[in-house]
Amino acid sequence: MTTVSIDARIVSTPEIMGGEPRLEGRRIRVKDIVMWYEYSGMGADEISHTFGIELADVFAALAYYHIHVDALRARWAAQEAFAETLKQQIKSKR
């Protein structure tokens, strides 16, 4: 039996996707999986099948999220606040 840690499945590289935690070898962020699971109501099996990833990767991303929930929520809130600031500063062409 092979043991694989969450750290082997979830990586964060500053030059890829702004350093967002993501699945190793993929451009699927932990945030994406959390959103699909918690806010879109997709099940782990459905996420795995729809996006062609291993079920273990889905659960690794969800475990990583729950281990780092406060830091990730703070990061995501800061990103949303920054995006809102940009929206306020940049006038729409419409």
Image (tube, rainbow, N blue to C red):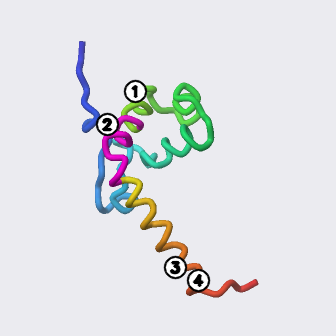
Magenta residue span? 62-71
Q: Amino acid at mark 2?
A: Arg
User: Which amino acid lies under the numbered mark 4 shown in the image of this protein?
Assistant: Gln
The residue where tag 1 is placed is 56
**70 is within the stretch colored magenta:** yes
Q: Are marks 3 and 2 in contact (CB under 8 Å)?
A: no
- Tag 4–tag 3 contact (CB < 8 Å): yes
Counting residues from the start of the chain, the first of labels 1 and 4 encountered is 1
Q: Position of residue 63 (x, y in %)?
A: 36, 35
Query: Is 46 left or right of 12, judged from the image as shown?
Result: right
Question: In the rendered image, which residue does mark 2 sit on?
Answer: 9
Can you identify the residue that label 3 sits on?
85
Q: How far apart are the alpha carbons under marks 3 and 1?
A: 37 Å
**Residue at the spot 44% in from the left edge and 33% down from the top edge:** 58
Q: Position of residue 27 (x, y in %)?
A: 44, 49
Residue 88's tag is 4
Q: Earlier in the sequence, mark 3 or mark 1?
A: 1
Question: Number of marks in the image?
Answer: 4
Residue drawn at x 39%, y 38% is 61
